[in-house]
Image (spheres, rainbow, N blue to C red):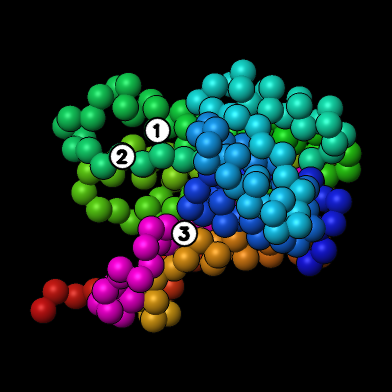
Amino acid sequence: MNWTNKIVMVTGAGSGIGRAVALHYGANGANVVVAERNEEAGQDTARFIREAGGEALFRPTDVRSPEDIVKLMRHVDEKYGRLDVLINNAGVSRWKSPYEITVEEWEEIIHINLRGTFLCSREAAKIMKRTGGGSIVNIASTRAFMSEQNTEAYAASKGGIAALTHAMAISFGPDRIRVNCISPGWIETGDYNQLRDMDHEQHPAGRVGKPDDIARACLFLTDEYNDFITGANLIIDGGMTRKMIYEE
């Protein structure tokens, strides 16, 4: 995979999965646009990429704001004249009883996770359409398909992203824009060494996931040689959603 001179944007790239994705593209030669509302975290990611010999541009962006998204895409278009890859990673979670969650809390999660994904994709697609196509990857979650208690807003937003993905794949397909989705399971973004043996053993793959697992999948899905893959949802969870669980 050669990403030299490719323009890649990653939203929510200040930490966790987003940072890992940005670092992987930077290490493979891409010009990475780091879009992040936490300025310190975003600047750190861009600095890490540059210190490793890559190219990176930080743009403070809050995907709750349609105006921020338009400004972000306009700046990238003016600077580079193209956008080859968009990774929609920005997202938040909140576990709260459906009896107690407020309208404002519900809307914040939907606006960041789902509406933000749509608006970033639409504005990016306008650039991609003009320049011959591109690739979009949306980060959903296995919680789009299975749940724990008190996750309604998050599950709804991630289920919406999964559905939005195949809808946009059809709408953007004639413009040579591919749209795919990754649904991560347990991806540990904290101290991996603090995990227990039982945490790893419950996964058929034998371990809890890491952000790098998702980053490598993004590289695969956006590789121009994989141009027959669109509208797909790639579940990366160490096999957990395929494991039958019975109470003893």
Amino acid type indicated by mark 1: Ile
Where residue 87 appears, as percent x and y from the top left, is: 63, 47
Amino acid type indicated by mark 2: Arg
Say if 35 sits above or below 136 in the image: above
* Label 3 SS: strand
Q: Which residue is mark 3?
A: 184
Which residue: 75% across, 62% down?
28
Which residue: 88% across, 39% down?
131
Q: Which residue is mark 1?
A: 109
Count all numbered tags in the image, as a single digit. 3
Where residue 210 appears, as percent x and y from the top left, is: 47, 66
The answer to the question of whether label 1 and label 2 lie on touching residues, with beta carbons closer than 8 A, is: yes
The quadrant of the image that shows the N terminus is bottom right
Q: Which residue is mark 2?
A: 94
Q: Is residue 93 left or right of residue 25?
A: left
Say if 212 sits above or below 37 in the image: below
Residue 85 in view of the camera: no
Distance between the alpha carbons at the discs numbered 1 and 2: 8 Å
Distance between the alpha carbons at the discs numbered 3 and 2: 17 Å
Say if 83 sits above or below 228 in the image: above
Q: Which residues are magenta?
A: 177-202
Name the foreground residue: 36 vs 219. Answer: 36
